[in-house]
Image: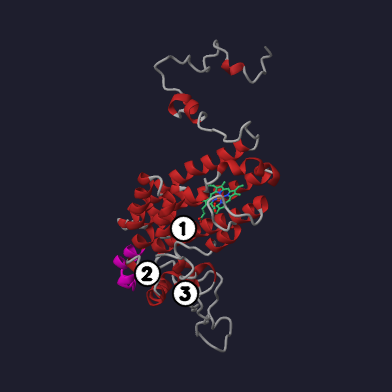
Amino acid sequence: MNAESPAEGLLPDNPAAPRAIEAHHLTYNDYLMVPELLQLQRPQSDPPHHDEMLFIIIHQAYELWFKLILHELTRAKAFVDRDQPLRARHFIDRVVAIMRLLVDQIHIVETMQPIDFLWFRDRLMPASGFQSLQFREVEFFCGIKDGRYCTFFDNRPEMREQLQDRLDGDDLRAAAWRMLQRGGFAVPDAALDPERRDEPETFDAMTLALVPILEAPDEHMQESMLLESLIAFDEQLALWREHHVRVVARVIGWRMGTGGSSGVDYLKSTTTKSAFPELWAARTRLVRSDTSGGLSLRRAEEAGSPSGAKPERCPVDHGSGVGSGNGNGNG
Ligand code: HEM
């Protein structure tokens, strides 16, 4: 063999070559259970349609990432509960990185021609994304709670119970608001109650409570950094919904979903859901003052403004767009 060969390092007489693997050694395949994993793709079409493998694997990959997202969010919430926003942020940022991948990943199914999908789509009925327990758990755990989705698990009592626990359990949104209340911000008690936090009066007070943090991030650095990570997560979740609906329209047009929904129109209606709508709405309420420390902000006097140090006021409208407190359908 040529001395330059890339396989040179693998030859047994090379001292740097890997040691022989003995029966009792932990191997890559044992540790990751690769043989078992590769047995889990079972096409329904007969004979198997070539593209069904893609359809199965992409969904399985999503479910694995959903598992990790739940794992990381649980950790993040534990740090929020312990008033350690920067530690919490570390794990939220990991989730944001995963979500970015998931937004991109949905487009792989577009390499499937619509007509090819039709070859095996009927075989999947009534399986549907509605039955992704982990997706719904992510929503509920963040605070996007809607008990109507539990009915999609009626045939799997253990799954239904798991989702019900998420519905009844504590969530990240409530945890973040408790932390802010403990931190001395003007948080109304109703903000901590999932049944009341989206009532207009409460929601309004919540957005106002965020204003001091958003107007002076340097003074509330830890809270500010956590809130930025939470809105980044919310943004990625919304982007996933938008990309998914676009991909669905491209692959099946306006056909009904296999889960019985109207399909694209239903999915479009979900794109206004938000885990932290108050974070979006609060932005509209910010008032710039010459002492608020923005990097590009020159003091009004220096700029020769006739208005002196008066703040610049923005109109308040938190009822539109992604940040709408009413767009969640929570309850
Ligand atoms: C050809 C590709 C796809 C099509 C045509 C499609 C279609 C649909 C449709 C029509 C729905 C509405 C529910 C229903 O009536 O069934 C739905 C929901 C859903 N899909 Fe997909 N989907 C595709 C790929 C994916 C992938 C790769 C994932 C990754 C996990 C996914 C996850 C979901 C989830 C979680 C929902 C529930 C969304 C919600 O209720 O907010 N879908 N999908």
**Is residue 183 highlighted in magenta?**
yes
**Is residue 194 highlighted in magenta?**
no
- Image side of residue 232 versus residue 221, left or right: right
Tell me which residue sits at (50%, 75%) in the image.
319
| Residue 317 visible from this viewpoint | yes
Near mark 1 (Cα within 10 A), the count class, few <14, some 14-19 or many ≥20, is: many
Asked whether the residues under the numbered discs 3 and 1 touch, taking CB atoms below 8 Å apart as contact, a structural biologist would say no
**Which of the two residues, 199 or 99, is positioned nearer the viewer here?**
199
The amino acid type of the residue labelled 2 equals: Arg
Question: Residue 229, which numbered label?
Answer: 1
Q: Quadrant of residue 211?
A: bottom left
Tell me which residue sits at (52%, 46%) in the image.
126
Mark 3, mark 2: which one is toward the viewer? 2
Mark 1, mark 2: which one is toward the viewer? 2
Mark 3, residue position: 292
Q: Secondary structure at mark 2?
A: loop
Tell me which residue sits at (65%, 34%) in the image.
50
Question: Residue 197, which numbered label?
Answer: 2
